[in-house]
């Protein structure tokens, strides 16, 4: 069993290499296309450009009424604020349900479980009306404020699981020494939970960066667009789209996510394996 | 006194969540239930409509029928195919193969990128008439149609996009496979069980809790899918409603035509559908999911 014949092993590698090539080829092709002149993009499937042409990047960067860099700043602001909000609010919530004893704790936890099941479409319309009354539509508030209110129960669970694994004796010893729950949370639990907080932060960043629906609903002026909405701008101008420019900007919007993937690949995969995160 | 204060200290940590729960989840959910029985266009105040919205959805609106059919076909095709690929690759990776980490990362990458607009636009160009796929097919002498604008094929391109992202269920399968107790396999091998028997009699039954988890999560997710259909069809759900996901139709009704009451009714039916499917999955799970005592 352990001494598998070499041919079997080769077969496995052939299948895996073949599958990964087929899967990754579109991505490589997109990157390659961003380096080709438009005339060459749809005339060949080859990856190596015959004429290296970087002009797609400058065309894309300045191709819409507003510079693409502006969208990057918007996306970055929303994503960073979301990370801060999500990590703070979800860790507070997770700390309460995992380390503190109070009446109604179980009920709260089941309610959190329940919110995981509710699709966002149900709350979408009243939320929109609410934010409209607050005059928050066309600002980043509807996208950021919910993150400060622990609206994404998935991250509460991720952190709850981790907090539960920390030894209880820490809290007990701290209470003996006269520590308040707030100091325990801030000075003991959070510093010990950096790996879990990091996982939550990275996933929050990627999810927010990739989010299309929220910005589509709430951001109407091009000035406030995120990169995802900006990319769509290339499609909207119907007729002859500048595919090279679009691919170039698509590559740029994927770059931050790719960077996280390259540097934190293990953390991400571990996060999925242990929490069952769906992406 | 101090004890009593400590007893309720938990709530001070829950303040953000409590505000969010009542203000952004429970309140809006109830409000949308109310709105679903009204006509509301954001300008005039809601007018009571009784069951009119629901009646129109069930019996008068042909587009609802289209969108339900498209969504069900999408769920029924994409979920089994995605989980099938995920399990197959996870099984191969679990054979103690060299370079496991590299393969796992490569297969996971599409899952991480797949939700973005960049990938959806890429998809549109891979499956267009002069796109990548048809160039490849031309090498073997096949002239493919414009997949995204052909009503018979458009939905398949979205299924392909979903299956392409099999990496995250694969990682969950792989984690499940690695937790299977090895001594059972050794005992079975000593008793002369072939690899095939071991798979059908041991691996698969013991993996059913993980299969069940992936099935439920991916099914709910497929019901909620929006971005790929929106981008690939340019927001229309076309050609001829072939990619009109239920969520996309809901969006059009709410933010295209400002029929908020109608859209709220659509949303509540979606919740009921998801709850029914989940409940059904849990009910049948007793007969096929194997939990260890």
Image (spheres, coloured by chain):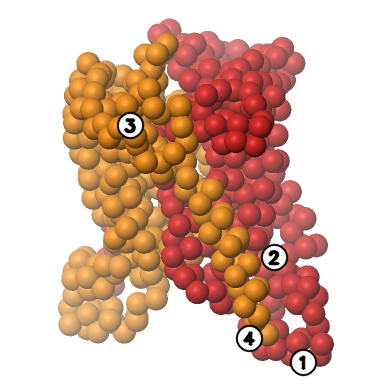
Chain colours: A orange, B red
Position of residue A36 measured from the top left corner of the image (x, y, whole percent)? 33, 31
- Residue B249: x and y in percent read 57, 21
Q: Which residue is mark 1?
A: B190
From the image, tell me which residue sits under label 3: A36
Q: Nearer the viewer, residue B237 or B27?
A: B237
Element carrying mark 2 = helix
Q: Earlier in the sequence, mark 3 or mark 4?
A: 4
Check the picture and name the quadrant holding the N terminus of chain B: bottom left
Where does label 4 land, which residue? A2
User: Mark 1: few, some, or many residues within 10 Å (few <14, many ≥20)?
Assistant: few
Chain letter of mark 4 equals A
- The reply to whether label 1 and label 3 mark residues of one chain is no
Question: Which residue is depicted at the point 40% across and 41% down?
Answer: A47
Q: Give the mark nearer the N terminus: 1 vs 2.
A: 1
Residue at the spot 66% in from the left edge and 32% down from the top edge? B141
3 vs 4, front mark? 3
How far apart are the alpha carbons under marks 1 and 2? 24 Å
To which residue does mark 2 refer? Answer: B208
């Amino acid at each position: 069993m352990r001494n598998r014949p070499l041919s079997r092993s080769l077969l496995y590698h052939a299948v895996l290499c073949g599958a990964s090539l087929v899967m990754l080829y579109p991505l490589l092709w997109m990157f390659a296309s961003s380096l080709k002149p438009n005339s060459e993009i749809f005339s060949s499937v080859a990856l190596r450009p015959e004429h290296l042409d970087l002009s797609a990047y400058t065309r894309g960067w300045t191709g819409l009424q507003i510079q693409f860099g502006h969208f990057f700043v918007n996306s970055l602001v929303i994503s960073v604020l979301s990370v801060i909000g999500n990590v703070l609010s979800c860790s507070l919530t997770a700390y309460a349900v995992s380390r503190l004893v109070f009446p109604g704790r179980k009920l709260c936890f089941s309610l959190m479980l329940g919110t995981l099941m509710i699709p966002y479409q149900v709350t979408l319309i009243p939320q929109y009306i609410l934010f409209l009354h607050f005059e928050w539509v066309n600002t980043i508030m509807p996208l950021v404020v919910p993150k400060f209110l622990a609206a994404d129960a998935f991250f509460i669970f991720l952190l709850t699981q981790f907090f539960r694994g920390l030894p209880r004796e820490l809290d007990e010893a701290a209470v003996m020494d006269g520590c308040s729950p707030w100091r325990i949370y801030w000075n003991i639990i959070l510093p010990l939970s950096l790996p879990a907080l990091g996982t939550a932060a990275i996933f929050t960043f990627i999810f927010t960066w990739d989010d299309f629906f929220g910005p589509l609903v709430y951001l109407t002026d091009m000035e406030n667009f995120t990169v995802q909405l900006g990319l769509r701008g290339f499609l909207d101008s119907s007729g002859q789209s500048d595919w090279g420019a679009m691919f170039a900007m698509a590559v740029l919007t994927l770059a931050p996510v790719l960077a996280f993937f390259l540097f934190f690949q293990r953390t991400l995969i571990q996060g999925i394996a242990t929490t069952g995160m769906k992406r | 006194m101090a004890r009593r204060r400590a007893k309720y200290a938990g709530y001070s940590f829950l303040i953000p969540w409590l505000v969010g729960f009542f203000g952004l989840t429970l309140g809006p959910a109830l409000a949308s239930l109310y709105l679903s029985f009204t006509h509301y266009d954001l300008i005039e105040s809601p007018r009571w409509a009784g069951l009119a919205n629901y009646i129109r959805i069930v019996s008068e609106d042909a587009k609802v029928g289209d969108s339900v059919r498209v969504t069900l076909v999408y769920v029924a095709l994409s979920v089994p195919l995605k989980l099938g690929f995920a399990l197959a690759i996870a099984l191969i990776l679990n054979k103690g193969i060299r370079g496991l980490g590299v393969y796992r990362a490569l297969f996971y990458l599409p899952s991480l990128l797949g939700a973005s607009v960049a990938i959806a636009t890429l998809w549109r160009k891979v499956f267009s008439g002069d796109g990548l796929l048809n160039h490849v097919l031309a090498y073997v002498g096949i002239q493919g149609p414009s997949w995204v604008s052909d009503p018979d094929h458009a939905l398949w391109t979205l299924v392909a996009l979903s299956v392409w992202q099999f990496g995250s269920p694969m990682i969950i399968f792989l984690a499940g496979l690695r937790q299977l107790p090895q001594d059972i396999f050794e005992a079975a091998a000593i008793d002369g069980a072939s690899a095939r028997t071991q798979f059908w009699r041991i691996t698969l039954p013991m993996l059913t809790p993980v299969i069940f988890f992936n099935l439920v999560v991916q099914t709910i997710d497929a019901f909620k899918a929006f971005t790929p259909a929106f981008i690939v069809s340019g927001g229309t759900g076309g050609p001829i409603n072939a990619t009109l996901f239920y969520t996309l139709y809901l969006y059009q009704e709410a933010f295209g035509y400002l029929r908020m009451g109608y859209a709220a009714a659509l949303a509540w039916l979606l919740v009921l559908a998801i709850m029914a499917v989940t409940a059904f999955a849990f009910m049948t799970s007793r007969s096929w999911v194997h939990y260890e005592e």
